[in-house]
Amino acid sequence: MNRIFGRVLFGAVCLVLALLTAGPALASKRKEASQMSLQALNLYKLGEYAKATDFYRRAYKLDPRRPVYLYGAARSQDKAGRSQSAQSLYKLFLELAPADSRHAVKARAHLARLQAASASRKQADAAESRTSALVVLGGGGVTLLAAGIIYALAASDNADLDTELAGHTVDTPVTSLSYTQAIERRESANNRIVLSWALTGVGAALTGVGAWMWTRRTPDPDEVGWQVVPAARGLKVRLAF
């Protein structure tokens, strides 16, 4: 019984000591986070938005009970033109902050503005991408048409030459067409056939590229790459697409 009591007493003492030591450490982290947020604000005013974002994130990591640091990071990314990252930070802030707080109202307004701008930009990018795809598809179609015409003309010349040489023998040569002329006409026709094959390959490639451009999803530059975002317990890294 005494042993059990001793263990309980020892555990209680350890708990009290842990609480006593955790209090000053927590207060120190909060103070450091507050100082970092002031540095971040100064950097924000100077236009150093990337550095300001970093300081706000570090402040939040030290004191995650103050989501207002996330709002500061979101505003910094917003000013830096990092729309997607700013939207992610605004959303995370709104998940943690009181819905009726002053910063939450502002965050919702900023988030709505960025989402509307992103939707408009994506529509414009999609239209531009479709236009480019049509141009490439048109180029492929024209190239294939040219290849077909060149091949048909060359094949026709070869057929005409075969007709003219149909009765040619050693004893009864075709006097209207010399050997040299026949060779030149045959080589010319065959060279054009080879050219038509090459153009067919180019046209097929252009058509394939155009079809890919038509169907592909145009990525948002802000969505691609590694993103480091604050989480409830520190920072998390993710590869966004």
Image: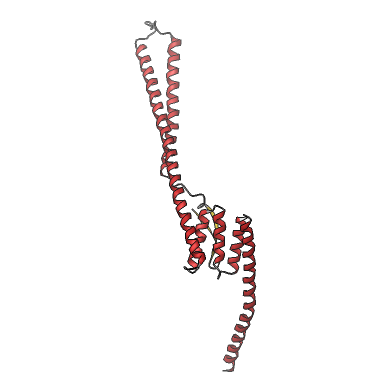
Task: Tell whether 238 sits left or right of 194.
Answer: right
Q: Name the one closer to the observer, 176 or 109.
A: 109
Q: Residue, x 62% and y 55% (percent of image)?
A: 48
Q: Name the one closer to the observer, 159 or 110.
A: 110
Is residue 228 visible to the viewer in this orientation of the structure?
A: no
- Measured as percent of width and height from the top left, residue 153 is found at 38, 20
Q: Name the one closer to the observer, 170 or 166.
A: 166
- Measured as percent of width and height from the top left, residue 222 is found at 52, 52
Task: Tell whether 174 sits left or right of 20.
Answer: left
Q: How many marks?
A: 0
Instruction: Locate residue 174: give its quadrant.
Output: top left
Q: Residue, x 64% and y 79% (percent of image)?
A: 21
Instruction: Locate residue 160: give its quadrant.
Output: top left
Task: Tell whether 11 sits left or right of 125.
Answer: right
Q: Residue furthest front?
A: 102
Q: Colour mode?
A: secondary structure
- Measured as percent of width and height from the top left, residue 52 is found at 61, 59
Vertical placement of residue 80 versus 182, above or below: below
- Measured as percent of width and height from the top left, residue 195 is found at 45, 25
Vertical placement of residue 12 versus 233, above or below: below
Vertical placement of residue 70 versus 226, above or below: below
Is residue 101 visible to the viewer in this orientation of the structure?
A: yes
Which quadrant, please, contains the N terminus? bottom right
Q: Name the one closer to the observer, 132 or 27.
A: 27
Q: Residue, x 64% and y 60% (percent of image)?
A: 42
